[in-house]
Image: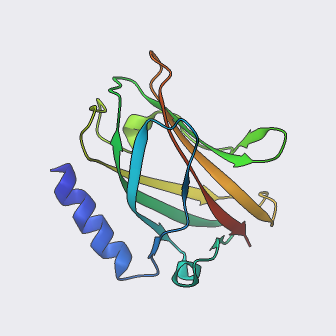
Amino acid sequence: MAILEFIVVALTLASVNTERVRNYRMCPNSDCLIYDMFIDPCPEALYNKACGWPRNSNTTVAFIYNPEFSAYSPKTQLYSETFLVDWPFLNIDTNACLYTNCPVQKDTEQYWLFNLFVPEYYETTYHIVKFVLTDTISNQQCCFTFDINII
């Protein structure tokens, strides 16, 4: 059922303003593979540029991933990566089971669908977004980064 839901969502997104994002980067020591990532809105992806996320609007991130670990109660977070410290995005529910099927199964292709409201108070600037999915028991992580401009 989840596969069918993801296909319907991906096709729906593809018909709007969604683009396949190819300029993401895996974090060092990440315990997963990411592929087929889509962001709505992101017309900039056609030119391999950072996605523009308008303030006071919704953004959707969808991707397929293959974790190298299992997790029964995984946590997730989005960070704005900086030179000194990673700042968590506010208003993110860290229960990863809201965005993917749980339990997360090792070496099994899974689907992620994340809707994020970009509030008015987010700073209008370039961000390197770090996505982290963590198994709370083993602390293994699926981690990657991608670029956005909050506009």
Q: 111 above or below 36?
A: above
Q: Quadrant of residue 52?
A: bottom right
Q: Residue 58 in the image: state x and y as whole percent.
A: 56, 65
The residue positioned farthest toward the top in the image shown: 137
67 displayed left or right of 94: left
Q: Residue 90 in the image: state x and y as whole percent.
A: 68, 44
Of the pair 137 and 60, the residue shown nearer to us: 137
Q: Residue 107 in the image: state x and y as whole percent.
A: 26, 37
Q: Quadrant of residue 49?
A: bottom right
Of the pair 84 and 1, the residue shown nearer to us: 84
125 displayed left or right of 33: right
Mark count = 0
The residue positioned farthest toward the right in the image shown: 84
112 displayed left or right of 5: right
Q: Quadrant of residue 16?
A: bottom left
Name the quarter where the C terminus is drawn: bottom right
Q: Which residue lies at the image location 35% right of the left edge and 33% below the top edge?
A: 68
Q: Residue 121 in the image: state x and y as whole percent.
A: 79, 57
Q: Which residue lies at the image location 77% right of the left edge and 65% below the top edge?
A: 126
Is the image coloured rainbow, by chain, by secondary structure, or in one colour? rainbow
Q: 98 above or below 60?
A: above
Q: Which residue lies at the image location 65% right of the left edge and 63% below the top edge?
A: 147
